[in-house]
Amino acid sequence: MEKSVDKAVWDIRDIMRHFGKSHTTVWHWRKKGYLPKPTYQMGQRPYWDAAELVEFLRGRAGPDHGSEGSSLPCDK
């Protein structure tokens, strides 16, 4: 089941909670281009438009993943 977007703007903590990953993992995803560039930046803190982020991730999901998958790598 897909999780809903409950806020208009997401920060790193929201992405961490949504995917159940650590801050370091999300930072690596950003660095490797698995996440889009932030929509907003306040100082050093990035923020994403939640709907745009979800659409970006849906677009990265391959045909094998369907609507519930994403192409984000898992922790090892």
Image: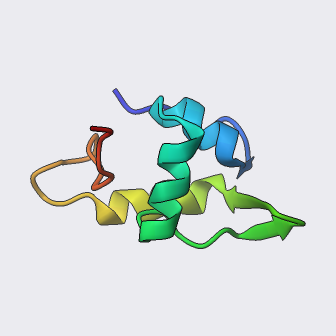
The N terminus, quarter of image: top left
Q: Residue furthest right?
A: 43
Picture quadrant where residue 17 is located: top right
Percent coordinates x, y for residue 66 in the rendering: 19, 48
Picture quadrant where residue 33 is located: bottom left
The C terminus, quarter of image: top left
Picture quadrant where residue 69 is located: top left
Q: Residue at x 52, y 63 (%)?
A: 30
* In the depicted structure, whether residue 74 falls above or below residue 51: above
* In the depicted structure, whether residue 26 falls above or below residue 46: above
Tally of numbered discs: 0
Percent coordinates x, y for residue 58 in the rendering: 36, 57
How does the figure colour the protein chain or chains? Answer: rainbow
Q: Is residue 56 left or right of residue 52?
A: left
Q: Is residue 54 left or right of residue 76?
A: right
Q: Residue at x 46, y 35 (%)?
A: 19
* Camera-nearest residue between 51 and 75: 75
Q: Residue at x 68, y 38 (%)?
A: 13
* In the depicted structure, whether residue 69 falls above or below residue 47: above
Q: Residue furthest left?
A: 64
* Camera-nearest residue between 55 and 42: 42
Q: Is residue 44 left or right of residue 50?
A: right
Q: Residue at x 9, y 52 (%)?
A: 64
Percent coordinates x, y for residue 16 in the rendering: 57, 37
Q: Is residue 3 left or right of residue 59?
A: right
Q: Is residue 4 visible?
A: no
